[in-house]
Image (tube, rainbow, N blue to C red):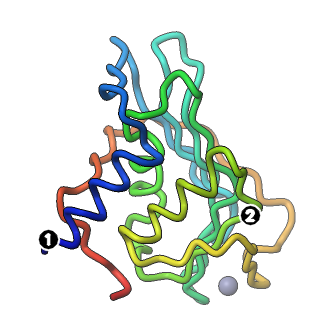
Amino acid sequence: MGTRVTLWSRLAAGCLGRAPAGEAGAGDFWKYRPPTTPAGFQQFMACAADGSDFARVTWQTCAQCRLGLVVQIRVNPKRRGAGYGTRLMLRAMRGCEAYTWTTTVQSAEFGRPFFRALSKSTGAAFTAKANLCEHMAIEPRPEGPAQREEPPPRAPRRWPHWRR
Ligand SMILES: [Zn+2]
């Protein structure tokens, strides 16, 4: 149990920043764009009151092959340190936590440290080598229209370690 606390502390202090958690702006809201094919692109984003998104993840999952792929994740540098990246990923992985998760190329500045820490917390590999099955590769695969969603959970105090 102590280990989990340590891992979480490291995650919080490392890639998510030591700055006081960035205050949620008044009027912030969350949006989801569902896939238009069973294994197509999905998107989840955090938006400011003016409607512009400041944190966004694009991903694909295939229920048949039990694969998840993070196509892109980004958090506006001004909003880093407040756990938005983790919350995006908790939403993306919801119901698919035990899938085999990979990512596209990870940026050295954000992606690599972020996924390294998230991998420790969740037990998902997040290997930086996209693993696409035939269902995920079907073109075109645009996201559907955006719809508002309830805010996703914050990082749990104790991670479930889905694959351990
Ligand atoms: Zn598949």
Q: In this view, does 54 lie above or below 147?
A: above
The residue singled out by tag 2 in the image is: 104
Position of 141 relative to 23 (above/below): below
Q: Residue at x 67, y 66 (%)?
A: 103
Mark 2: amino acid: Thr
Camera-nearest residue between 79 and 20: 20
Q: Which residue is drawn at 25% across and 67% down?
A: 159
Q: Which mark is residue 2?
A: 1
Q: In this view, does 32 lie above or below 51?
A: below
Quadrant of res 39: bottom right
Left or right: residue 131 compared with residue 61: right
Q: Does dot 1 land on a helix, a strand or a loop? A: helix
Quadrant of ligand 1 in image: bottom right
Taking the image as shown, residue 49 lies to the left or right of residue 67, namely: left
Q: Earlier in the sequence, mark 1 or mark 2?
A: 1
Image quadrant containing the C terminus: bottom left
Residue occupying the point 28% across, 46% down: 154
The residue drawn where x is 53% and y is 54% is 114
Residue lying at the far left of the rendered structure: 1
Marks 1/2: CA distance?
32 Å
Classify 10 Å Cα crowding around label 2: few (below 14), some (14-19), many (20 and above): some
Q: Which amino acid does label 1 sit on?
A: Gly
Q: Do the residues labelled 1 and 2 touch (CB within 8 Å)?
A: no
Q: Position of residue 3 (x, y in %)?
A: 21, 73
